């Protein structure tokens, strides 16, 4: 039967999986120190960019001998830059359990035409990472942003691997423990877990990845924005804030403010705890309602950021239409914005639970989800 609208609304109804909610303390006035109208190559600009790199290293615990660079075109640009610059020296193992991983498969197989073995799993499941050949280069996502599935750990990746591991960690960095000794290339974007602004990517390289860059030249031409070496040597400036193209200093300031906020909540451990608390609130709700369930059945591989849900009720004739109607009803009520499943994923909902989201807002939203479900099922 239909139920009444809940009395309490989320203070922030933004549960989009990208761009994601800003930190709770966000205020445009906090960006007033951005050096707008100044060259990013001026001392003030370079200092800001270098601080973004150093603060990233500190909070994520990136080893001192790993390079961190700010690169164009968000996570997509960072990962493309890595694939086009590093792959081809040996065969590749391409891993996909959701749409973005599938996109990397397409680029390697159809564009770069590298000798590759493809490993896939259905949405809600994960590839057996222990079955891969790590003498080859391995490309994978740590967290499936569109499937709600994440790597439980890096135990399957051998320390004595001959190939490189290229990890798209865009909805994992700042919310999950990343085993840096198992990752040779790691990419992410500012607009995910820390709620930064779009168009800037982060590229983290291990010493093994740098060695590959300096010893191998791809057979294909590289666009300027992908080039990380000159004369067979790494362009070190890229990893000290001397960006390849012009960054937005307003976005840089916003990222710096987000990193500072991350410190106030306990750094990486605090951010993980916040995401875990948000996800637990949803898990408790799912346990109490038999008409909804996680897309990922195995709790060990469930994401704590992009939480994907599906409806389970025999009265639903058209799953896609029903899920869209529920999402639209919640958006119209201004209690949950942008929570429809990704267009290539199974029908359902996708609720962002990263650390910038307050658990109190998840708690306030969930009764509205029940209201929307009951209203639609009885319509």
Image (spheres, rainbow, N blue to C red):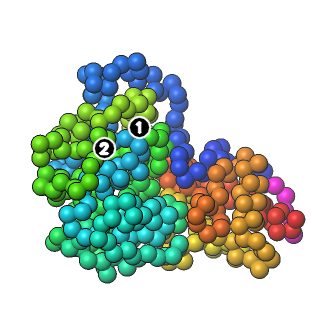
Q: Which residues are magenta?
A: 1-5
Measured along the vertical axis of the image, is residue 358 above or below residue 284?
Answer: above
Is residue 253 left or right of 28 when viewed as pictured?
A: left
Q: Residue at x 33, y 34 (%)?
A: 245
Q: Are marks 2 and 1 in contact (CB under 8 Å)?
A: no
Can I make out residue 56 in this image? no
Question: In what quadrant of the picture does the N terminus appear?
Answer: bottom right
Q: Residue at x 20, y 73 (%)?
A: 135
* Disc 2: which residue: 223
Is residue 170 left or right of 156 when viewed as pictured?
A: right
Q: Residue 232: where, in percent of width, then height?
A: 12, 47
Helix, strand, or loop for circle 2?
Answer: loop
The numbered mark, 2 or 1, whose residue comes first in the sequence reads: 2
Q: Residue 97: where, in percent of width, then height?
A: 46, 70
Q: Is residue 308 magenta?
A: no
> How far separated are the C-alphas under marks 2 and 1?
27 Å
């Amino acid at each position: 039967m239909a139920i009444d609208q809940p009395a309490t609304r989320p203070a922030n109804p933004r549960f989009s999986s990208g761009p994601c909610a800003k930190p709770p303390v966000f205020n445009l006035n906090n960006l007033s120190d951005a050096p707008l109208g100044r060259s990013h190559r001026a001392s003030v600009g370079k200092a800001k960019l270098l601080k973004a790199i150093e603060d990233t290293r500190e909070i994520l615990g990136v080893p001192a001998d790993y390079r961190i660079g700010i690169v164009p075109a968000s996570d997509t640009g960072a990962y493309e830059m890595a694939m086009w610059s590093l792959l081809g020296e040996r065969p590749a193992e391409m891993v996909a359990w959701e749409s973005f991983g599938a996109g990397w498969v397409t680029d390697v197989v159809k564009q770069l035409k590298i000798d590759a073995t493809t490993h896939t799993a259905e949405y809600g499941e994960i590839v057996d990472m222990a079955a891969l050949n790590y003498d080859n280069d391995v490309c994978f996502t740590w967290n499936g942003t569109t499937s709600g599935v994440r790597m439980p750990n890096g135990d399957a990746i051998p320390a004595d691997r001959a190939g490189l591991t290229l990890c798209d960690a865009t909805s994992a960095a700042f919310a999950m423990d990343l085993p840096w000794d198992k990752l040779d290339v790691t990419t992410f974007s500012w607009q995910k877990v820390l709620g930064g602004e779009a168009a800037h990517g982060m590229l983290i390289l291990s010493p093994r990845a740098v060695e590959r860059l300096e010893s191998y030249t791809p057979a294909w031409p590289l666009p300027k924005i992908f080039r990380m070496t000159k004369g067979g040597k790494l362009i070190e400036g890229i990893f000290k804030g001397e960006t390849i193209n012009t960054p937005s200093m307003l976005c840089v300031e916003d990222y710096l403010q987000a990193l500072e906020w991350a410190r106030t909540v306990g750094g990486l451990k605090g951010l993980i705890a916040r995401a875990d608390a948000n996800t637990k609130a949803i898990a408790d709700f799912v346990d109490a309602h038999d008409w909804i369930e996680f897309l990922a059945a195995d709790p060990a591989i469930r994401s704590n950021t992009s939480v994907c849900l599906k409806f389970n009720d025999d009265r639903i004739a058209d799953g896609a239409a029903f899920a869209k109607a529920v999402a639209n009803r919640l958006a119209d009520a201004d209690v949950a914005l942008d929570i429809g499943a990704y267009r290539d994923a199974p029908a359902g909902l996708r609720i962002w639970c990263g650390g910038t989201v307050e658990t109190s807002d998840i708690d306030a939203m969930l009764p509205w989800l029940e209201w929307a479900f009951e209203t639609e099922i009885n319509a």
